[in-house]
């Protein structure tokens, strides 16, 4: 029925299938639009830089588009006379009369926008990409990372200031962390890099390694995910969008306390004529992490002889990443076609276990390597006007090794005693290898002026193998697993500009997992390995709507019935200690969000916005190993009902762009709603849950951030001096249920944390050269957010940055 | 909305926020005074399947409700318990293995106070009192972890480790089968250690005989291993109570090769063997076959005068599906001299606390034993002489790991 697919193009079967599915949705109206022709052009600034994200509209019509990263745009419209209008924050609006004749595309000469001297006026009227994301019906916080490029931190530190988010670290640079979104964590929250799921990218490609300089924007979706991020996230996702400037160089180096070095290099080159594009992102992190901690000093017998503040002595962390992408941009067949390679690795010393600093380690180390070839393709108006296609593919090869071969017992003075066993914990040199193929296909089709339908398909295939030269027969390595996951999402989006937007979506989750099991060891029949397979399909659905009740009051509502699929390890166990449970169901959650945003243009000088939000989650069928002490074997089961009710609020204030302040606070009540507990062993069945109705322990429930900044210009030509102060607060909470045990005698408290940070930045030559001084935890407070794992005290950093954009 | 309205609504929101944020105090602890004070290790399992253990003081085991809600000492991680004089040692922890010493306190909010702790490099297999002033902790590593048994001497008063002695595991190892601790007994200058074997996949390949290792005491120098083929190995994984010494110095070894306590096969009948005082062989004249009389014994506690109390499986034939189950238990009184097993009436058929311990407390002619059924957890008072039991105090919790008298 649809004849617009040229035969000479070779596409995978799945693409054809999706197009076929798509074609079913196409109403007859589409065909009349085939008479449309293209208006093609490029927008740049006076100094020749491409102007990204400029809005191109035909005045008085609904025909509109955004300029691509390289400033190019193509806009389909029927023949006629129009006023073409181009607007962009920071530039004067440009308009010109054009005439479009039927049958041939209109190629405009390059359009130069002149910079606006009165930023204020424009920025009120126009929205940045970040603001646009925030305007969707989803409960999303989009952070414009550009404002953070001069600061020294990593993406985790940025995310930790988002309401609903708590990142709980066990130490300094490169330490383990737990990302908690509305109280959910682990596999329930998924992470994306430019829309590519990065679950298995390896431990050197995690948010505490990425410098903020790498990102253009960071989006945090809470509870409800657009189909474009196709994955089985139970509680939300974080999407890091890397920088899209066509030509730029951003190099920075920071040095600070605990011998911490961070270097980053981000650059892009696009040849305007040939369309050749080369992009590079690189970063390097190193730290001794030798901050002081308050710990017990033990003698050879393990007895505490004193308590002291000593430096950590075995906590070096080093990581490096290089990403190179090359390809073409702005071609007829591709707006962007990039081939890339991401190479990354880290080396880490392990000073302590994950939950206690009582006993240090002095020789345990780990390392990881990742090699990830990537392919990115995007084209607007492919085959038919209004059909936008993007395809991402990655194949990641990652390995992780843990090394523990020292027969020693260390104390916090770095002294050691010989040990009777082969390692500090368990002698190992176990190396785990993961291979994963990831493919994401996004199709957007503009049905009509206000309607867009989107299809998203994500395919992942994951394999895991392992080998330990110290224990060649290691049970967990004898059963390699692999799993295939298909997530298909479809959404219908309707938008009345500045009035109403809604997205209704459905998602189909399918997985197919394979492993082996050992049978016969429990009886006298001998060991038999047999193959295991499990596949299942689930459906989820939801919507997200935003409605301007008044021009200054936006209401948002969203809902999703979300799933997290079981992982192969959870379904099949490790072959012995964790037994299979093929009847395992996905974790599921009903996620509901409601929010308001009120912007108060009290006057041109003062701007205030207030954003209260409410969340509700009813989550059940958590995938967990039942508590057991009687047996070395167990299996994952679906257990537990949890209800989450949360409120958060954010207030922002800005005075003439000179002073800005913001504050947010999150309160959440996450309660156990489970009637009975399945225990294997203790009582061998179901017992009443005495914790029903109580808060789930070990989850922060009241926390907030405050930020105050000011800018002073005029010290020197084209220079800006800015000061920033930030405060983060987390109310104390307990590792176990607060209601159980005498509260006054409870020692498993994670105390209230208050950290004050200051940043001073001096930018010269319109931001070309920047010096940033940073002091974190000014008052040297003892900070803990993962039970007894003390975080760094007061720390100073200086960062130098060079940035040019053409 | 003007600024004033905005201010008002913001303040209202702040007040509402503050109101919901303040959690109500939930302190339930009432002073526990009087002549006798008991301490109970109560385990609470949440729907996140994390066990948290609480030590709760109580006056009575026979009436009322003993609850950790707003009451008791919170102990991190999973805990096993052992008594050392009037102190309770709670072994376990989170990320580390420590022995927390807990004592009675008239003034502490929960009437319990942590009086010291020592840290061990790895999990202990057991800790027990060896004389008036000392506890001993024992760790037998698997071959992939290490090659030496560690004996830790812990001072009861200071809770400190005073001495660590190691001895090679090699004499106890049989090929790829690792020795697994099942019990201990001391008689004079000999330390008897009973053990079984697991292979790397927890299979029990060596169930055709009973193994006992002998060490010099208190030097803990390995002397010999002796075996007997009338039964399988003594005890079971994690039950810790395979050996016990009676008044005349004889040591009894209980064997059951019980599948529901973790054996993967069973080749010999269950029963008791005897080591005559000072001997380093089993007494060939004594074998009490318990399979014929009562079933497979899961847990046992010696009470005195040849009498022991035991939890015995009522499953007549155990299959692989019952493995690790520690289930369908009845309570019986065993007379080692008369070779009789008599069932106690009044205790429902129940499951064990995961085979880890037999959390009984003995006082006078009564044994106090916690049982969890669908009705909840209750302490049963078992009268040994009359073979009857009555239901006593109710426990709010998932299981009871130990009962001790601390005052």
Image (cartoon, grey):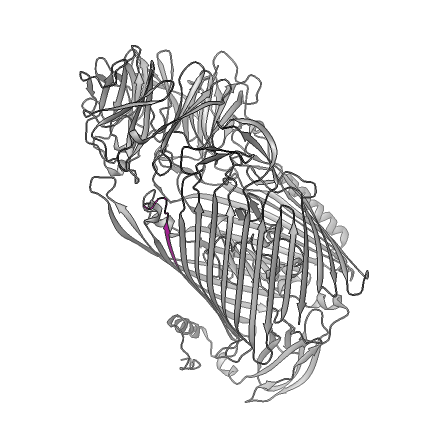
Left or right, residue A209 beside residue A82: left
Is A529 or A165 nearer to us in this picture?
A: A529
Extent of the magenta region: A462-472
Position in image of residue B347 (x %, y %): 32, 22
Position in image of residue A408 (x %, y %): 46, 35
Q: Residue at x 67, y 40 (%)?
A: A780
Position in image of residue A616 (x %, y %): 53, 49
Quarter of the figure with the C terminus of chain A: bottom right
Q: Is residue B357 above or below residue A652?
A: above
Q: Residue at x 40, y 74 (%)?
A: A16
Is A127 or A468 nearer to us in this picture?
A: A468
| Residue A9 among those drawn in magenta | no
Residue A499 visible in the displayed image: yes
Instruction: Please identify the quarter of the rendering in which residue A247 is found.
Output: bottom right
Left or right, residue A310 beside residue A536: right
Instruction: Please identify the quarter of the rendering in which residue A595 is found.
Output: bottom right
Position in image of residue B360 (x %, y %): 37, 21
Residue A162 visible in the displayed image: no
Q: Is residue A481 above or below residue A365?
A: below
Instruction: Please identify the quarter of the rendering in which residue A471 is found.
Output: top left
Q: Residue at x 72, y 64 (%)?
A: A767
């Amino acid at each position: 029925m649809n004849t617009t697919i040229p035969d000479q193009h070779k596409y995978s079967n799945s693409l054809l299938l999706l197009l076929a599915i798509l074609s079913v949705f196409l109403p007859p109206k589409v065909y009349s639009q085939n008479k449309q022709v293209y208006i093609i052009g490029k927008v740049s600034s006076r100094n020749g830089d491409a102007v990204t994200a400029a809005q191109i509209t035909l005045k008085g019509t609904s025909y509109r588009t955004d300029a691509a990263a390289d400033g190019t745009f193509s806009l389909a419209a029927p023949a006629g006379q129009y006023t073409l209008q181009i607007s962009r924050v920071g530039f004067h609006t440009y308009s010109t009369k054009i005439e479009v004749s039927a049958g041939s595309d209109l190629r405009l000469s390059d359009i130069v926008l002149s910079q606006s001297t009165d930023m204020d006026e424009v920025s009120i009227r126009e929205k940045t990409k970040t603001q646009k994301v925030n305007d969707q019906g989803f409960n999303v916080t989009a952070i414009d990372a550009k404002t953070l490029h001069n600061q020294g931190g990593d993406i985790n530190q940025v995310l930790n200031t988002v309401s609903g988010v708590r990142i709980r670290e066990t130490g300094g640079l490169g330490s383990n962390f737990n990302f908690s979104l509305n109280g959910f964590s682990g596999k329930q929250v998924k992470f994306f890099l430019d829309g590519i799921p990065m679950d298995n990218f390896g431990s050197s490609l995690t948010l505490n390694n990425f410098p903020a300089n790498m990102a253009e924007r960071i989006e945090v979706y809470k509870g409800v995910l657009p189909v474009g991020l196709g994955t089985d996230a139970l509680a939300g996702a974080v999407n890091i969008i890397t920088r899209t400037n066509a030509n730029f160089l951003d190099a920075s180096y920071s040095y600070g306390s605990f011998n911490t070095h961070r270097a980053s290099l981000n650059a892009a080159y696009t040849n305007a004529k040939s369309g050749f594009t080369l992009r590079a992102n690189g970063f390097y992190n190193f730290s001794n992490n030798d901050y002081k901690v308050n710990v017990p000093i033990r003698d050879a017998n393990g007895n505490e002889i004193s308590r002291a503040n000593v430096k950590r002595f075995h906590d070096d962390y080093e990581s490096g990443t290089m990403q190179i992408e090359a390809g073409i941009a702005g071609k007829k067949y591709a707006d962007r076609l990039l081939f890339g390679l991401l190479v990354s690795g880290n080396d880490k010393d392990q000073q302590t276990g994950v939950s206690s600093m009582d006993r240090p380690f002095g020789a345990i180390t780990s390392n990881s390597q990742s090699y990830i070839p990537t392919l990115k393709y995007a084209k607007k108006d492919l085959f038919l006007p209004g059909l936008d296609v993007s395809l991402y593919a990655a194949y990641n090869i990652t390995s992780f090794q843990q090394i523990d071969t020292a027969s020693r017992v260390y104390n916090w003075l770095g002294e050691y005693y010989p040990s009777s066993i082969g390692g500090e914990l368990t002698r190992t040199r176990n190396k785990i290898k993961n291979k994963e193929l990831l493919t994401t296909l996004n199709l957007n089709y503009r049905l009509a002026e206000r309607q867009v339908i989107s299809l998203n398909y994500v395919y992942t295939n994951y394999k895991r193998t392992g080998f330990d030269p110290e224990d060649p027969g290691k049970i967990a390595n004898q059963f390699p697993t692999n799993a295939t996951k298909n997530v298909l999402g479809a959404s219908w989006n309707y938008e009345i500009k500045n009035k109403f937007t809604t997205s209704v979506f459905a998602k189909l989750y399918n997985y197919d997992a394979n492993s082996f099991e050992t049978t016969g060891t429990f009886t006298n029949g001998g060991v038999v390995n047999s193959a295991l397979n499990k596949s299942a399909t689930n459906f989820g659905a939801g919507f997200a709507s935003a409605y301007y009740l008044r021009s200054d009051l936006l209401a948002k509502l969203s809902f999703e019935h979300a799933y997290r699929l079981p992982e192969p390890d959870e379904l099949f166990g490790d072959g012995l200690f964790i037994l299979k449970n093929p009847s395992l169901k996905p974790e599921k959650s009903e996620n509901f969000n409601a929010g308001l945003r009120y912007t108060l243009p009290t006057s041109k000088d003062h701007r205030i916005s207030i954003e209260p939000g409410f969340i509700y989650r009813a989550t059940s069928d958590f995938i967990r190993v039942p508590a057991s002490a009687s047996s070395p074997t167990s299996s994952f089961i679906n257990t537990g009902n949890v209800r989450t009710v949360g409120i958060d609020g954010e207030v922002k204030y800005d005075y003439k762009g000179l002073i800005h302040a913001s504050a947010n606070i999150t309160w959440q009540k996450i309660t156990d709603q489970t009637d009975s507990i399945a225990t294997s062993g203790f009582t061998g069945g179901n017992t009443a849950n005495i914790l029903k109705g109580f808060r789930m322990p070990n989850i922060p429930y009241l926390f907030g951030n405050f930020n105050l900044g000011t800018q002073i210009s005029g010290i020197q030509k084209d220079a800006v001096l800015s000061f920033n102060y930030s405060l983060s607060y987390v109310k104390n909470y307990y590792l176990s249920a607060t209601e159980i045990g005498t509260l006054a005698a409870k020692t498993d408290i994670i105390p209230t944390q208050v950290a004050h940070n200051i940043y001073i930045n001096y930018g010269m030559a319109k931001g070309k050269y920047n010096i940033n001084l940073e002091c974190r935890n000014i008052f040297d407070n003892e900070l803990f957010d993962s039970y007894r794992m003390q975080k760094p005290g007061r720390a100073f950093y200086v960062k130098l940055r060079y940035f040019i954009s053409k | 909305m003007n600024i004033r309205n905005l201010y008002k609504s913001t303040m209202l929101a702040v007040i509402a926020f503050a109101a919901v944020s303040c959690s109500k105090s939930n302190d339930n602890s009432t002073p526990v005074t009087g002549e006798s004070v008991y301490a109970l290790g109560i385990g609470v399992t949440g729907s996140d399947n994390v066990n948290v253990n609480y030590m709760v003081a109580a006056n009575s085991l026979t009436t009322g409700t003993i609850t950790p809600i707003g009451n008791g000492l919170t102990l991190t991680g999973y805990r096993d318990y052992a008594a050392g004089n009037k102190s309770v040692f709670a072994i376990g922890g989170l990320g580390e293995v420590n022995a927390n010493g807990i004592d009675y306190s008239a003034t502490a909010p929960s009437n319990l106070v942590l009086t010291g702790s020592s840290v061990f490099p790895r999990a202990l297999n057991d800790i027990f009192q060896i004389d008036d002033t000392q506890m001993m902790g024992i760790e037998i590593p698997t071959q992939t972890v290490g090659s030496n048994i560690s004996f830790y001497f812990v001072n009861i008063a200071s809770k400190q480790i005073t001495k660590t002695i190691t001895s090679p595991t090699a004499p106890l190892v049989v090929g790829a089968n690792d020795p697994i601790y099942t019990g201990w007994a001391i008689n004079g200058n000999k330390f008897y250690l009973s053990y079984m074997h697991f292979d790397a996949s927890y299979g029990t390949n060596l169930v055709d005989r009973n193994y006992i290792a002998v060490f010099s005491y208190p030097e803990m120098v390995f002397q010999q291993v002796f075996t007997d083929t009338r039964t399988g190995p003594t005890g079971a994984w994690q039950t810790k109570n395979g050996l016990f010494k009676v008044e005349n110095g004889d040591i009894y070894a209980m064997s059951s090769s019980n599948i529901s306590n973790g054996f993967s096969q069973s080749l010999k009948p269950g029963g008791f063997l005897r080591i005559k005082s000072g001997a380093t062989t089993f007494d060939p004249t004594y074998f009490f076959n318990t399979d014929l009389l009562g079933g497979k014994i899961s847990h046992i506690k010696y009470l005195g005068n040849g009498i022991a109390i035991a939890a015995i499986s009522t499953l007549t034939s155990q299959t692989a599906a019952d493995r690790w189950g520690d289930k369908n238990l009845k309570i019986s009184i065993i007379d080692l001299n008369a070779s009789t097993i008599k069932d106690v009436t009044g205790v429902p058929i129940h499951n064990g606390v995961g085979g880890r311990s037999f959390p009984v407390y003995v006082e006078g002619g009564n044994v106090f034993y916690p049982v969890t059924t669908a009705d909840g957890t209750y302490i049963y008072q078992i009268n040994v002489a009359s073979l009857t039991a009555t239901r006593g105090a109710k426990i709010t919790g998932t299981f009871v790991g130990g009962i001790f008298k601390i005052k």
